[in-house]
Amino acid sequence: MRDTPLSNCERLFLLKAIEEKKRLDGRQTYDYRNIKITFGTDYGCCIVELGKTRVLCQVSCELVPPKDSRPTEGIMFFNLELSPMASPAFEPNRQSELLVLLNRQLERCLRNSKCIDTESLCVVSGEKVWQIRVDVHVLNHDGNLMDAASIAAISALSHFRRPDVAIQGQDVTVFSPEERDPIPLSIYHMPICVSFAFFLQGSYLLVDPCEREERVKDGLLVIAMNKHQEICSIQSSGGIMLLKDQVLRCSKIASVKVSEISELINKALENDRKIRKEGGKFGFAESMPKERITTLKRDKAPVEMTDVEETANDIVNRTETTTEVVPSPVLVATGTAQVGEGIVNSWGLDEDEEDEPLTEDRKTDEVMIISDSEEEEVVILNEEAQKSKKKK
Amino acid sequence: MAGLELLSDQGYRLDGRKAPELRKVQARMSVFAQADGSAYLEQGNTKALAVVYGPHETRGSRSKSLHDRAVINCQYSMATFSTAERKRRPHGDRKSSEMSLHLKQTFEAAVLTELYPRSQIDIYVKILQADGGNYSACVNAATLALVDAGIPMRDYVCACTAGFVEDTALADLCHAEESGGGTSLALALLPRSGNIALLQMDARLHQDHLSALMEAAMTACKGLSKVLDGVVRQHLEEVSVLTSE
């Protein structure tokens, strides 16, 4: 299904608001929306909510023979899917540009930056290695899928535990979680993507664009960083022209945001670990508030209201009262009332009809013929009733 | 490949270049008679071929045409014999699709598309031999092909890669340097205004080094633009000599 196109007035409104440094939900230029990370009952399952954008990530593992070129390293496989439930624009089985871009960016952010120690995933060199598969599903699209996907992926990878293996000669025994505790993956660092949207030929930029803002953007710059201030990947897209100092400024902003988000992820992981240890209830069902309507829930949006009243009063006082006098309706006959006199017919009629003067002294009990009909005779129905009324 | 150091103590790289030196660039324009514009470019051992058709009427679905601009359609593919191991899928895989998208965005920013509403410009690029800097070679070859086709552009689009080894920025990486695990930054630049049309970087780099790396890439691009300009002028001289008689 095609997505509804953005109307011109909506586009102009959004651009005008961005020029005045105002956003639809009242955020500042560099503010992120509320990030909520919840883990499921299985290890390696995580849902990230970035405002209304919701992304689910699941990590799983499998023993496979390794690649020929790298016999001692494990394999990482990333897959991002745009589920049709996320947005009417996403159709199943259609490889759109957005899907390719998101997949490649996710791969670049997590694989090329070597955040996971792949050598530790080797079980038997050249024969069996662990293949870690990261599946990201977009559940709701409200802008900035890249950031949400990267946060979900790295949180899920940090949360995941793989089964323990024991090697005795040529025998490989994989222990189930009941026999031996599963082992977490060894993660060197947590790369997180930060998206910057550029508007109006690069003069304005916004962090974490929502879906509406994304539609009017000129281009996008995605910087993946970790909290040690190392840039893992930069990607500019959308055909905007950037200047070198713009990119440097963005990287500085990104480092601040990334440290905040890393804090959040670590705290969420800590909480989950504590709850599991204490034997409390955990999982997705716990994270959703019970007995509350969730679909129509709206968070309070901090909108600037300081001078709204003054501006409104200003506008009201400035407008002059209309001098037009509207006459009250006159009841001319049963079922016929008249308001005003009407203007002269300007449809280009014959000469003599134009000179017909407007009769001001109309007798109220005279029946008015208000019709444009071309017929010679106009028959007035209900004549007897009229006459009887007059007599009374 | 242990023991191959990317930068020796005397400051020489694997192929004997110094850190900011570019590889030898050789290019020819108008290599195909059928296409509106074509160019063949060699950057060291990387060989790229670019062909431009257009501007012509939008083929295929009418809905793709824009009422006020031309649509640029790019396809990037690598020949199966271009890499050391034979490539089984030359186009259609994710990396090629992503490269095609990036090329399209780069040229949409540089070409004056407002002059050709409701039409389409096709750019096809093929890598014949890949030795590092595939994207840059494509962009440079495509720029020459667009100039050959006579399509107006804001400026030359020059692209170059840059890497970072031991606090020194290297310009124009070859395949061994790229896959060595170090940083590699690909940058497409419009030299006169200094505007960056595309920026792509993989692998870890500390934030403080970013400025130096970008500076190295931008200087390399500006040097490359002079080379491309020389190629265009020489080609025009040859053509005018042939047609003036």
Image (cartoon, grey):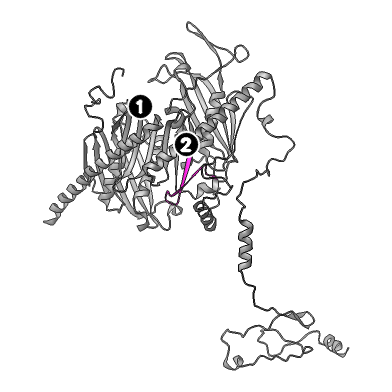
Q: Quadrant of residue A247?
A: top left
Report the front residue among B165 and A93: B165
Label 2 sits on residue: A254
Residue A112 on image: x %, y %: 42, 28
Is B52 inside the magenta-drawn segment?
A: no
Q: Look at 54% across and 43% down and name the residue there.
A: A143
Q: Which mark is residue B182?
A: 1
- Circle 1 residues within 10 Å: few <14, some 14–19, many ≥20: some
- State the SS at label 1: loop
Q: Which mark is residue B29?
A: none
Report the front residue among B32 and A214: A214
Whether label 2 touches label 1, CB < 8 Å: no
The vertical placement of A271 against B115, above or below, is: above
Residue A111 on image: x %, y %: 44, 27
Q: Residue furthest left?
A: B245
Residue B208 on image: x %, y %: 39, 32
- State the SS at label 2: helix
Q: Is residue A146 left or right of residue B213?
A: right
Give amino acid for label 1.
Gly
Residue A275 on image: x %, y %: 66, 22
Q: Chain of mark 1?
A: B
- Circle 2 residues within 10 Å: few <14, some 14–19, many ≥20: many
Quarter placement of the C terminus of chain A: bottom right
Q: Chain of mark 2?
A: A
- Give the prevailing secondary structure in the magenta stretch: strand
Give amino acid for label 2.
Ala
Residue B78: tell me if it is visible: no
Q: Look at 13% across and 56% down and name the residue there.
A: B244
**Magenta residues, as a range?**
A193-210
